Structures are given as structure tokens and as C-alpha cells.
Image: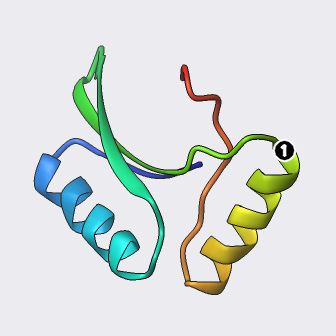
Amino acid sequence: MQVGSFSQAENAEGLRRRLVAEGFEAFVSRVATDAGTMHRVRVGPVPDREAAEGLLKQLSAAGQQGRAVRAED
């Protein structure tokens, strides 16, 4: 589940820390884009779509938005 994408690493790390404090398994991955390096904040992984939908509900209840992404993306 991707929760955010930031050009500044410290912004991504701040969101990751908040998510971890709320009990989520969050991490930051970096990806090179035409616009420069982006820092993606993700939660998971989960084994299947049903688990992803449950995780999305938990994120929503915590005031966060997310979208399901494949682990390779």
C-alpha cells in the first residue's frame, strides 16, 4: 500500500515515523524518475487483495489515504 510520495527524504521519513507510531509496518523506498528521486512511503506488504482492502480500511480509520500497489512498482 502506498501512502505517500515525496521529493524530500525527510518528509517521507516523517510520515513513516507517524505510521510506525500508529502500529503500521511502514517503510520508505526510493525510485529514480524523470523529475528526480522520489521517496515512496509504503505500508505492508500484505499477501492478497482481501488483506489490502483491510489495510486500506485501517489506514482510513487512522486518517491516512493509500492505494494498493504491487510490490515491484
**Residue positioned 67% across, 46% down in the render:** 46
Left or right position of 19 against 66: left
Left or right position of 21 against 59: left
Q: Nearer the viewer, residue 42 or 46?
A: 46
Q: Nearer the viewer, residue 6 or 48?
A: 48
Relative to 25, say whether 23 is above or below.
below
For the image, the number of numbered tags is: 1
Left or right position of 52 against 26: right
Q: Residues within 10 Å of mark 1 (few under 14, many from 20)?
A: few
Residue identified by numbered label 1: 49
**Residue positioned 69% across, 63% down in the render:** 55
**Dot 1: element:** helix
Residue 5: give x, y in percent of width and height: 37, 46
- Quarter of the rendering occupied by the C terminus: top right
**Residue positioned 84% across, 44% down in the render:** 49
In the rendered image, the residue lying farthest to the right is 50
**Residue positioned 81% across, 41% down in the render:** 48
Identified by mark 1, the residue type is Arg
Occupied quadrant, residue 37: top left
Relative to 54, say whether 73 is above or below.
above
Occupied quadrant, residue 12: bottom left
Left or right position of 15 against 8: right
Residue 58: give x, y in percent of width and height: 67, 75
Residue 59: give x, y in percent of width and height: 61, 72
